[in-house]
Image (tube, rainbow, N blue to C red):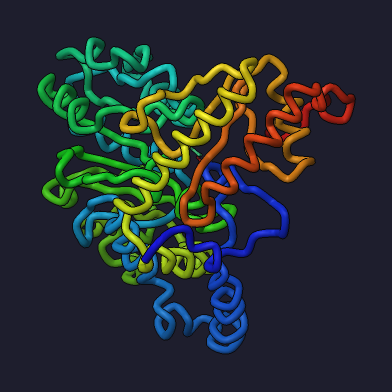
Amino acid sequence: MSLPRKDLFEMPEGLIYLDGNSLGPLPRSVAARVASAITDEWGQQLIRGWNVSGWMAQPSRIGDRVGKLIGAPEGSVVMGDTLSIKVFQALSAALAMRPDRRVIVSDTGNFPSDIYMAEGLVALKDAGYTLRLAPPEDVADHIDEHVAAVMLTEVDYRTGRKHDMNALTKAAQDAGAVMVWDLAHSAGAVEIDLAASNAEFAVGCTYKYLNGGPGAPAFIYVRPDLADDVQPALSGWLGHDAPFAFEPSYRPAPGIERMRVGTPPVLQMVALDAALDVWDTTTMAEVRAASIALCDLFITEVEARCPALKLVSPRDGSVRGSQVSFAFQNGYAAMQALIDKGVIGDFRAPDVMRFGFTPLYIDEGDVRAAAAIIEDVVTNDLWNRPEYLAPKRVT
Ligand SMILES: *Cc1c(COP(=O)(O)O)cnc(C)c1O
């Protein structure tokens, strides 16, 4: 099947959407499926829906669908909660595997929530843990025999720089540490072979490149040989071996099910399940090749038209995710002006204009048209208006 597949998505007329890295657009199949889940399942089946419509099995059934896109074997991925919660779960389980070590390594480019969750876990454990933040370029040099866990996000949310998953996993494991990967900007964007990486844990969200919708559930992967032993710190009833036995004390379920916590967000799961059908029409390899080509073209076009914008993403597509970022002093206001002109990207402090490319619904024509509008905004100072300069709550 050739790309793009614009027919599979709702997209307002005249919009060039370069923010699928923050919130993927609405796949056409989703609305009817969610409406049916509300009307036919919730409305008619009521509580029977848990069994009749398989609501209770959603987290692992949909986990297997996500697993296929990240190189994870069946039964190794489960859905639920938010990514921040999944980061906490994976990291706490990783620390429990190395009880005599007290250092967590991450990098300064990691998404703040991952760092914040690690800080919260360190404070909660109150056992002398420290969080060591290395520059992204030389994380490996900061991994030593004191390190319990290395927690990294493969693709940097700001710059799009992509870590070498296999090499860093090996570096962590050679030092005796446990590896936790955050695939938030990888799942649905780049090819991943989790099984081949040998990493112990991986987590990610599904509202970015997997188009699951705002608030879509996150995923967690545990390497299959460890899944019966990891300790779930968030020991909710749906991770219990027998939730409906209502036993007085927690006993973890076998395998990946123990990483479930509480009641799944059924309607969000239905939306995600429908959104994943898009992936039955293409392959990650096809999407990745097209994404690199679109990003390369965007860099060439923008650099030729707007010398004031400085590329902060890697020029080499093989070490870049599916986004391109440019630094521009008036980046916030410029992005507001662009959004007003129908080119939606986003802004990340202090000065980064970020553009995500998703070959499922973006083509070369969109890239050239967006570059021309960026040129207009930047060279004619169209950003310099009070309504563009005033910051909004969500950037
Ligand atoms: C998007 C993103 C998050 C967001 O976490 P939520 O709990 O889903 O809000 C966390 N970490 C990384 C690396 C992200 O890119």
Q: Position of residue 72 (x, y in %)?
A: 23, 53
Q: Indicate the quadrant containing the N terminus: top left, top right, bottom left or bottom right.
A: bottom left
Q: Residue furthest right?
A: 386
Residue drawn at the location 72% of the way across and 59% of the way down:
13
Q: Position of residue 66 (x, y in %)?
A: 34, 58
Q: Position of residue 202 (x, y in %)?
A: 30, 42
Q: Residue furthest front?
A: 304
Residue drawn at the location 67% of the way across and 35% of the way down:
372
Q: Would you say residue 7 is visible in this rendering?
A: yes
> In this orientation, which residue lies closer to the viewer: 328 or 264?
328
| Count of numbered circles on the image | 0
Q: Which of the 4 image quarters holds residue 121?
A: top left
Report the side of 355 relative to 167 (left or right).
Answer: right
Q: Is residue 230 above or below residue 14?
A: above
Q: Is residue 47 above or below residue 231?
A: below
Q: Position of residue 310 (x, y in %)?
A: 56, 17
Q: Which of the 4 image quarters holds residue 255?
A: bottom left
> In this orientation, which residue lies closer to the viewer: 155 or 342?
342
> In this orientation, which residue lies closer to the viewer: 148 or 30?
30
Residue drawn at the location 38% of the way across and 67% of the way down:
281
Report the side of 199 relative to 155 (left or right).
Answer: left
Q: Is residue 391 above or below residue 14?
A: above
Q: Would you say residue 131 is visible in this rendering?
A: no
Report the side of 356 relative to 69 (left or right).
Answer: right
Residue drawn at the location 36% of the way across and 32% of the way down:
317
Q: Indicate the quadrant containing the C terminus: top left, top right, bottom left or bottom right.
A: top right
Report the side of 214 relative to 332 (left or right).
Answer: left
> In this orientation, which residue lies closer to the viewer: 65 or 372?
372
